[in-house]
Image (cartoon, rainbow, N blue to C red):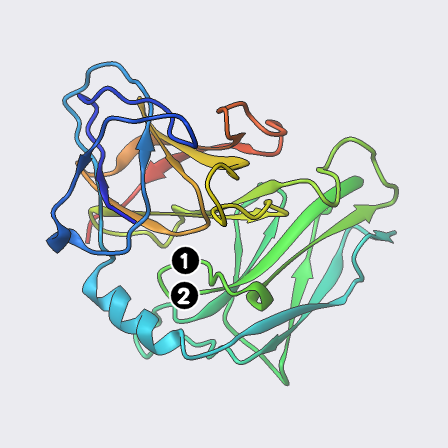
Amino acid sequence: MKLILLIALLSFVFTSAGIQSQALSLPESAGDNRTNLNLEKQSISPVIIKEVPPPVIVQQNREKLDTYHPKIELISPTSDEILNDQDWELVLGLKNWPISIDSDNQLGPHVVVQQDDFLPIRVTKVEGGQVTIPMQGLKPGSHRFSAYMAYPWGEAVKQPAARIQWRLHSLKRTKGTQPENDSPWLTSVSPSEISTGDLLLIDALIWNAPLQGLKEGDDKWRLKISIDDQNFFLDREEAIWIEGPPFENKILQLELVNSEGVPMQPYFNNQIKLIKVKSE
């Protein structure tokens, strides 16, 4: 797919079947096979951000790690279980992923556990193909969880077996507080606390998202990404790297919308983060 330059001076409109957009394509040398970034109309701004290829070190490490076929599974507690204690242990089974921390104590391939919209838990130790994570302070009611394999730079592995999602309940189920089991919902993967430098990694997992892109006009959802007053859309689960002014103290918003731009279950699928990236 063509790489699209994100410039706020352009006149943007939402792109899907039968809808057009005005955008400027970057030269082929900027990288092939990239995601289309479809931008919507915004106020004039001097800020310029654009999508760029991943850093060379990322591309090199991805090539090595993509030879693995990781698998993750929930062992305990079981999905949809009702827990009677606020403090409990999560046990996951892991296969074929080289979890590690290097000699400089830098994060290597790892596993991420996400509860609701809390900060992610990064797992770096495996024993006997399992990880056991003490979990504390689960408030009464229903909660959603996800776990996934992650690259050293925080991006989620997109292989289907490398991620899982489930529900747990503390003391009692609370109806209407979580997405339906078959409804699309969003896990924000990045930016995260391990982001560094002047490039911004944007990544997310979309659970139960209908398949699209198989034929013209079958679009059903978009991931709307807003950085301050600039918006663009992704039509597939694919991490992107953004270049622009130093990404500090900027507001990032991720919204799951339908093909017409209408929010889908906005309570679960509208997430805002404050970007605080420390330059190396």
Question: Which picture quadrant has residue 107?
Answer: bottom left
**Crowd around label 2: few <14 · some 14–19 · many ≥20 (10 Å):** many
Q: In the depicted view, which residue is nearer to us: 57 or 181?
A: 181
| 253 is higher (above) or lower (below) than 101 | above
Residue bearing mark 2: 151
- Amino acid beneath label 1: Glu
User: In the rendered view, does 78 fall on the left or right side of 67?
Assistant: right
Helix, strand or loop under label 2: loop
Task: Locate the C terminus by quadrant.
Answer: bottom left
User: In the rendered view, does 137 fall on the left or right side of 104?
Assistant: right
Residue 80: x and y in percent read 82, 52
Residue bearing mark 1: 155
Residue 250: x and y in percent read 31, 31
| 49 is higher (above) or lower (below) than 30 | above
Question: Which picture quadrant has residue 165?
Answer: bottom right
Q: Are marks 2 and 1 in contact (CB under 8 Å)?
A: yes
Helix, strand or loop under label 1: loop
Residue at x 14% of width, y 22% of height: 46
| 268 is higher (above) or lower (below) than 163 | above
Question: Which picture quadrant has residue 57?
Answer: bottom left
- Amino acid beneath label 2: Tyr
Farthest-out residue, top = 43
Q: In the depicted view, which residue is nearer to us: 265 or 36?
A: 36
Q: In the depicted view, which residue is nearer to us: 115 or 261?
A: 261
User: In the rendered view, does 50 fall on the left or right side of 210?
Assistant: left
